[in-house]
Every structure is written in structure tokens, then in C-alpha cells.
Amino acid sequence: MTLVRYNPNRIMNDLSRDWDNVIDSFFQFPSIRSSNGWAFVPKVDIVEEKDYLQMIAEVPGMEKEDVKVQVENGVLTISGERKPVVERKEESNYVRCEISAGSFSRSFTLPEHIDLEKITADYKNGLLTVMLPKTEKSKPKEIKVAVK
């Protein structure tokens, strides 16, 4: 009889991976796994205000020159490349390696009421903020009602 050491982390990792595969296949999300684990995909928050949409993307550890924002045919694309923090060498003995690096690209279809000519982007402290102003005709208008 062979003695096998119980490893709860392995079971949880397998469960997590299997659950991710179920969700990805159900919603048909693109895979974000690379051959050595998770690929870098920036997380994004989108907030709608009266006059604009604001998109905030997490791109830590990058310089503004490494991030590209492009609008074409009503699609906003954020792309770039995150360089490795430490150059990995064959002879290095990593105990743990979780910081992902590599190229990324995320695309978002913009609503028709966005003024494409006035889109601006700003990068500060690892956050990319893209301001998407609404066109004048799409902004809510208030109509005063006279009481007689």
C-alpha cells in the first residue's frame, strides 16, 4: 500500500480551475490562462455619470508608454505589454512565481451616444482612466412643468 500525502491546496486549485472552466464555457468568455498559469488581463470598472462614462483599468507596474488606447469603428481597445518584474533565468530556483507579464488587449463596444472626438485618457499610479463624454443630444434634459 502506498502512502499519499493529503494536500488541500491541490484540491482547491483543481476545484477552482474546474469551476472557472464551467463558467467560461457557459458564458463563452475568452480564456485568460497562459501555459504557465494566469495571463495578465487588466480589471476594468465602468461608471456612468450624467455627462460621461468613465472607464478605469488597473495596469500596475507599467509605464504610460507601455499602454495604448485606440478607438476604431466604435470599439475602444486598451492594449499593451507588462514586462517581467525580474528577468527569469533558467538557473534560477523560484519558490513561487505569481506575477504575470506579457501582452494584453481588451476591447469594448462603445454606445452610440459617446462623442468619439472628445475621448481622453490619463495614466497615474497604475490606473488608466479613460473619459468618454456623451453627445449633447444624449444627455438627459429637464423640462419644467408650469402649474396653472
Image (spheres, helix red, strand yellow):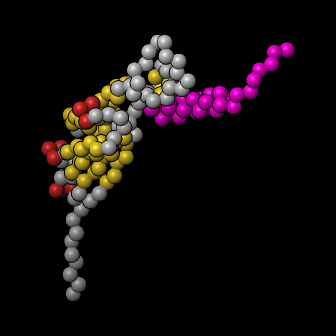
Q: Which of 114 and 37 lies nearest the eye of the viewer?
A: 37
Foreground pick, 13 / 59: 59
Could you tell whether 50 is left or right of 9 in the image? left
Residue 137 visible, this orientation? yes
Above or below, comparing residue 17 to residue 49 in the picture:
above
- The quarter in which the C terminus is drawn is bottom left
Q: Most prominent secondary structure in the magenta stretch?
A: helix
In the displayed structure, does residue 61 sit left or right of residue 2? left
Is residue 77 in view from this perspective? no
Name the residue at 22% across, 78% down.
145
Image spot of residue 87 (x, y percent):
40, 20
Image quadrant where residue 60 sits: top left
The stretch of residues the image draws in magenta is 1-30
- Residue shown at the point (45%, 32%) measured from the top left: 29
Quarter of image, res 116:
top left
The residue positioned farthest toward the left in the image shown: 117
Q: Nearer the viewer, residue 33 or 64?
A: 64
Q: Is residue 26 magenta?
A: yes
Residue lying at the far front of the rendered structure: 92
Residue, far bottom: 148
Looking at the image, the residue that sits furthest to the top is 90
How many labels were placed on the picture?
0
Task: From the top left corner, tell me how far across and down residue 85 is, in percent.
Answer: 39, 27
In the figure, 8 relative to 44: above or below?
Answer: above
Figure quadrant of residue 84: top left
Q: Is residue 143 above or below residue 108?
A: below
Say which residue appears at 48% left-offset and 35% top-offset.
27
Image quadrant in which the N terminus is located: top right
Q: Residue at x 22, y 34 (%)?
A: 70
Where residue 23 appears, as percent x and y from the top left, is: 53, 34
